[in-house]
Amino acid sequence: MTLATDLTADERQAINAFLERNEGYFEYMYLDSVGRVTIGLGTMLPDAAAAHAIEFFREDPPAQHLGRGPHRPQPQRPTGPVTAAEINQQFNLVARGAEAQRAAGAAGFAARHYRTVTYLRITRQEGDRLRDQHLELDLAALQHIYGHFNDFPQAAKVALFDMCFNLGEGRNGTRARPGHPAQRATGLRAFVTMNAAINHDPPQWELAAQRSARHPIGGQRNADTAALFRRCVIPRGAQESPHLDGRPRRPAQAPAAQPPAGPGAPPVPGAGPVR
């Protein structure tokens, strides 16, 4: 149950491209729209301890000021390997703006603002490692929520990875009982109607598209996710796939007045996978 064994190279590439287009990639710590410290391709860091597992390096200080006008001397940076205390200090510098970021909402500081707040950086290789680590957990969650996830068409997998990466798996809601108040569902599990539509036999991709909108995610990202689900809809009159993958099949047509195909003859092609 790994990305390498359960997803094709094309699926991994499509998932990574869609995520990067929506999440962006930043080699330094920044605050997301709700004030959580984040790094790389949307990897959330709940506390400074989580940042200790990341391999940081120090960005070179700005070049010496040679022009006219006031010059603010740069504080002296430590030398040698990046220390846990240094990571704590830099994490807290970024986290300090969380209250203002949450208050500003979508109009808050862009991630680029934090480039000058912290000098710690990660390599692209480290960013990709964090992304893949995140996606491995998401894959396990998706396979748990959707019993036939591995059979879904590529477009559905991309949409669901984007939602799980962004929202987390979450938990199911519970009813109130003595001594235990009711709990609302969270994360991807809060999309009860969408999840039921996807787990239906066969999957109801149009209903999934209609019930996939996230808040306060931007309209374009929601529209793109819904469009991915709609790519999986079986056209009216097409034969349904026996593998629940949402891909239309065309019945094979044997050529007239020809002998049956031999063992080495190529099979009659069906419809290609829907992205």
Image (cartoon, rainbow, N blue to C red):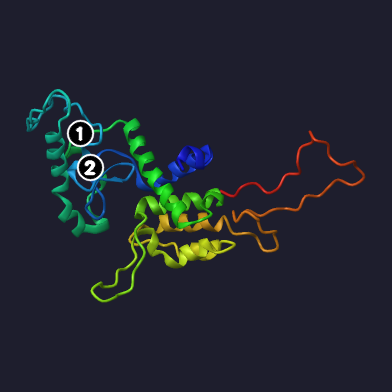
- Res. 50 mark: 2
For the point 48% across and 40% down, the residue is 12
For the point 29% across and 72% down, the residue is 182
Q: Quadrant of residue 79?
A: top left
Q: Nearer the viewer, residue 252 or 33?
A: 252
Give the mark, 1 or 2, whose residue is nearer the N terminus. 2
SS state under label 1: strand
- Res. 135 mark: none
* Left/right of residue 1 with respect to residue 43 in the rendered view: right
SS state under label 2: helix
Q: Which amino acid lies under the numbered mark 1 shown in the image of this protein?
A: Leu
- Res. 120 mark: 1
Task: Measuring from the top left, give residue 50's x and y in whole percent.
Answer: 22, 42
Q: Nearer the viewer, residue 208 or 231?
A: 208
* Left/right of residue 86 with respect to residue 273 in the rendered view: left
For the point 46% across and 55% down, the residue is 225
Q: Nearer the viewer, residue 124 or 63?
A: 124
Spot the residue most to the right: 257
Query: Whole-Å distance between the Cαs marked 1 and 2?
Result: 15 Å
